[in-house]
Amino acid sequence: MSKARIFIVRHGETDANKNGVIQGHLDTSLNAVGRSQAELVAFALQQIPFDYAYSSDLSRAASTAEAILKHHSGLQVTKQTELREANMGKLQGLNLAQRAQLLAKPNEKVDLGIESDKSMSQRAEGWWKQSIVQLLDSLPARDEPYRILVVSHGGFIGTLVKKLLRSGQAKCGQGVLIYRIFNASITEIEAGGGSKALIVRYGDIGHLDGQKLVEQNVDEDK
C-alpha cells in the first residue's frame, strides 16, 4: 500500500455557525469571516503539492475547497455526499431555543429524522475505506507520500477520527489531543505503507492569526 498525508479541513464560518443555527444537510454559504478563514487556510496549505482533492458537496465546504485549490492549478475537487455533516432532520434551520421548544412538547413523540451516531460512524468509516484505503492500494508506490486534501464538517471529521482510533486503525502522534474542530482548522493524518494511520495534528488553528472563533458546533448537540 502506498503512503499518503491527508489534510482534512473543516469549512469556514457561516452565519448559521455564528448564530447557533443547526445546519446538518442545509446548503449554507460562507459568511465574510468564513471567506477570510478559507483564504488563511489556503495560504497555510499553498506549498503542499496535492495529488487529490475531495470535498463535501455542500456549498460551505466546496467553497472552502475552491479557495484552497486556487493555489493548485490543474487540480479539480471531487465532491462527495459521504463527506456531509450529520443529517439533523427536523432540527435543521432551528436555533437551540427552538430545538428545546420542539423537544419539550408533552406526551408527544417527535420523529426528528436525525442521523444516528452509529449511522454516521459507519458512513465515515466507509468513506475512509473506499476513498483512502482503496485508493492507496491502487496507486503505485513512490518515494514521496501522496498528498490528499479533504474538506468536510466538524461532526464528520470528529466522528471519522474517533472511529479510526476506537477501531485500532489509527493512533495519535505524540502530544496530539482530540478536542474540538473549529472552523477552517486542519487535521493531518499519515496513512498507508502497511502501518496504522497516525494522527499528526487535530483541529490545528495556528494559521488563523488568533481570530475569535465560534466555540460551539450545535450540529454535534444531538
Image (cartoon, rainbow, N blue to C red):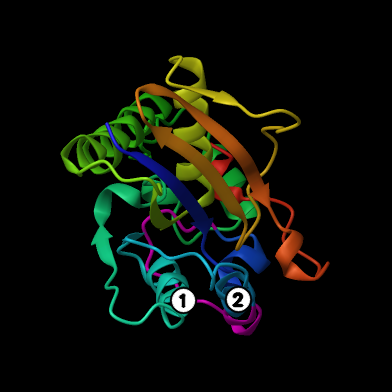
Asked where in the image residue 98 lies, by quadrant, the reply is bottom right
Of 208 and 104, nearer the camera is 208
User: Mark 1 — residue?
Assistant: 29
Residue under the image location 52 percent in, 57 percent down: 9
Residue under the image location 42 percent in, 35 percent down: 191
Vertical relation: 160 (above or below) 47: above
Instruction: Please check the rendered image and state whether residue 30 is part of the magenta-colored stretch, yes or no.
Output: yes
The residue at the far left in this view is 138
Instruction: Please check the rendered image and state whether residue 20 is part of the magenta-colored stretch, yes or no.
Output: no
Asked where in the image residue 186 lies, by quadrant, the reply is bottom right
| Label 1 neighbour load within 10 Å: few <14, some 14-19, many 20+ | many
Vertical relation: 17 (above or below) 40: above
Residue under the image location 33 percent in, 40 percent down: 113
Q: Identify the amino acid type marked 2.
A: Phe
Image location of residue 48, percent across then percent down: 50, 64
Vertical relation: 101 (above or below) 116: below
User: Mark 2 — residue?
Assistant: 43
Whether residues under marks 1 and 2 lie with C-beta atoms below 8 angstroms apart, the answer is: no
Look at the image and give the residue range highlighted in magenta: 22-36
> Distance of mark 1 from mark 2, alpha carbons?
20 Å
Image location of residue 33, percent across then percent down: 66, 79
Instruction: Characterize the magenta stretch by its predominant secondary structure.
Output: loop
Of 92 and 148, nearer the camera is 148
The residue at the far front in this view is 143
Report helix, strand or loop for mark 2: helix
Judge whether residue 102 can be spotted in this image: no
Image location of residue 187, percent across then percent down: 57, 47
Judge whether residue 159 can be spotted in this image: yes
Q: Is residue 18 left or right of residue 148?
A: right
